[in-house]
Image (tube, grey):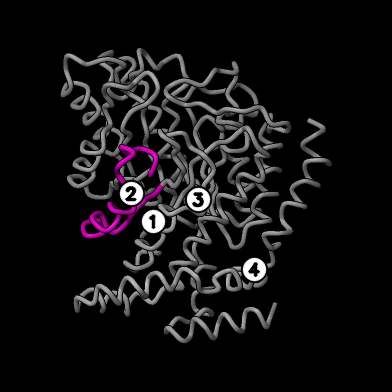
Amino acid sequence: MSGYYDCAREKYAGIGVDTEAAIARLSAVPISIHCWQGDDVAGFESGGRALSGGIQATGNYPGKARNPQELMMDFAKAVSLIPGKHRINLHASYAVFDGEPADRDALLPEHFAAWINFAKEHGLGMDLNPTLFSHPMVKENLTLSSPDEEVRAFWVRHAVATRRIADAMARATGSPALHNIWIADGFKDVPADRIGPRLRLKKSLDEIFAEQLPGVIDCVESKLFGIGLESYTVGSGEFYLAYAAGRPGVYNLLDNGHYHPTETVSDKIASLLAFFDKLPLHVTRPVRWDSDHVVLLDDELKEIAKEIVRNDALDKALIGLDYFDASINRVAAWVIGVRNMQKALLLALLMPFPTLRAMQDSYQFTELMACQEALKTLPFGAVWEAFCDRLGVPQDDQWLKEVKAYEADVLAKR
């Protein structure tokens, strides 16, 4: 291993890249890991509500977490196989009730005490999302944009409550908590009124963000369409970008599954960095639509990482993952996705961006293309293996053995 890495370090040094600096920098980058991969977005509310609002987890692989304890156990196993210290991203539907359950508009920080204790025990930061789907108060696919004032007010109270919970999480862990609002509001067919729902959504957001909470990083997340919402989505990309631009302290989260298939989030990153000091991201893998497949080391993931690194935005980008695959081992899905996000960032950290930028600015486009292509065959794998060794996690050819043993000892007995 040492000789393999030494050769790679020398090779990268030849193009002006310090592999030791890249490893050290990546070690300090937290990824916000979504809890819902472990239980197919089910949550722990009473009543066993079916998923709705464009949410769909497919597959029935054995070993799904059935309660908070099992989900925490599975999450802990996953992070033990992922290099570095990270964050846990929760939905409000994962509240843990000790006694009488509370409805979503009455949630309190104590309903997340078990998660806060878990995060502190494992050295994790925390993020939170209000859950504005799969609930009886979602009326005709509308929540914060509903013309029914009772419905709209209910969901405003819910988001106000979750912001306060996020602030409590931040105070408990000593790290600001990202609070992300995504709604599935929209219409299946062509609407008669497009602006009315958006004005109601704007009013709702103004009410939600009225309270100043220092531990909370607020963001809103757009979507192109959803199942049953094919013709019109209230929270569109243009709406949320304009809202965030006009409301200090609110950010526009980019989910790379929430745009037209011909759009790429990597191309949007630099534009937002020109105006915002933070860039929240949900990284997923859409296949033909927003299907939330496990993140692979594909071209778009690499481009997203390049844009973050080349723009010196590792401290500005709040990187979270968002996918749910119930057709494979759920713990393995977590490990694969997070490690691939880290691999993409490491690949970007191993690129000589000052040299490449100088070529572009001096119109050396032939040299730029040749250099970018040559970078693709450099021994990145040796640096990744060294990174895993330094942080004490198994290599790519070893971690799955631990997951399969965990499956045999724990998951298969559920």
- Callout 2: 10 Å neighbours few (<14), some, many (20+)? many
Residue under label 3, please give it.
32
Please give left or right for residue 209 compared with residue 323 in the image: left
Point out the tag, 1 or 4, that comes first from the N-terminus: 1
Residue 363's place in the image compared with 136, above or below, is: below
Give the number of the disc on residue 265: 2
* Residue 304: numbered disc: 1
**Marks 1 and 4, how far apart at CA:** 24 Å
Decide which of tag 3 and tag 2 comes sooner along the chain.
Answer: 3
Q: Helix, strand, or loop for circle 3?
A: strand
Tell me, yes or no, whether the two marked residues, 3 and 1, touch with CB atoms within 8 Å: no
Dot 3 crowding, Cα within 10 Å, few <14, some 14–19, many 20+: many
Q: Secondary structure at mark 4?
A: loop
Magenta-highlighted residues? 256-281
Q: Residue at x 33, y 49 (%)?
A: 265
* Occupied quadrant, residue 81: bottom right
Q: Which residue is mark 4?
A: 391
Packing grade of label 1 (10 A; few <14, some 14-19, many >=20) is many
Rendered-image quadrant of the C terminus: top right
Q: What residue sits 61% from the left and 53% below the top?
A: 120
Mark closer to the observer (3, 2)? 2
**Looking at the picture, which amino acid does disc 3 mark?**
Ser
285 and 124: which one is in front? 285
Alpha-carbon span between mark 2 and mark 4: 30 Å
